[in-house]
Image (cartoon, rainbow, N blue to C red):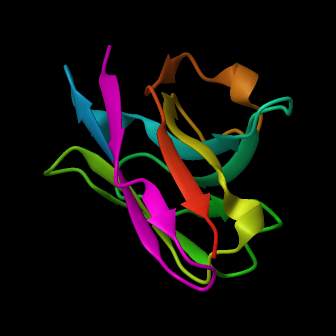
Amino acid sequence: QVELVESGGGSVQPGGSLRLTCAASGGASSVYAMSWFRQVPGKDREFVAGISDNRGTAQFYGDFVKGRFKISRDNAENTATLQMNSLEPEDTANYYCAARRPTVHRNPLQYGIWGQGTRVTVSS
């Protein structure tokens, strides 16, 4: 079973960009669908984006994304990346990478493999 480690979080002003990376180890990540979720204290974990396994030909996004984020994967590097643009204060949260087989699912309860999370803060 793969292990996931997120990186790339930080603080940014509204309108700025961040690039989150999820690095997988302990196995080939290409067989997994990879997703990003986010969570703020007191709220449920929310689906942000997901990408299908292997070539990643299918991408899925939460309704709130509205074209601002893009998910991609590099199977040679065993990474999944979330490029976030036009960030808003409402995007402030802990962001988590998750993996499952065989397909992306929007319900976090369907994932058994999680990273430890990376913090994103959007503030002026």
Above-or-below relation of 64 to 34? below
Would residue 96 be found to the left or right of residue 81 on screen?
Answer: right
Residue 16 falls inside the magenta stretch: yes
Q: Determine if residue 51 is in view.
A: no
Among the 4 quarters of the image, the one containing residue 107: top right
Q: Nearer the viewer, residue 124 or 92?
A: 124
Above-or-below relation of 95 to 71? above
Q: Residue at x 83, y 31 (%)?
A: 44
Q: Residue at x 43, y 27 (%)?
A: 115
Would residue 42 be found to the left or right of residue 47 on screen?
Answer: right
Q: Position of residue 72 (x, y in %)?
A: 40, 64
Among the 4 quarters of the image, the one containing residue 103: top right
Region of the chain picked out in magenta, as a range:
1-21
Q: Position of residue 110 (x, y in %)?
A: 69, 23
Q: Position of residue 118 (x, y in %)?
A: 46, 41
Q: Residue at x 67, y 82 (%)?
A: 67
Q: Determine if residue 35 is in view.
A: yes
Among the 4 quarters of the image, the one containing residue 87: bottom right
Q: Quadrant of the C terminus?
A: bottom right
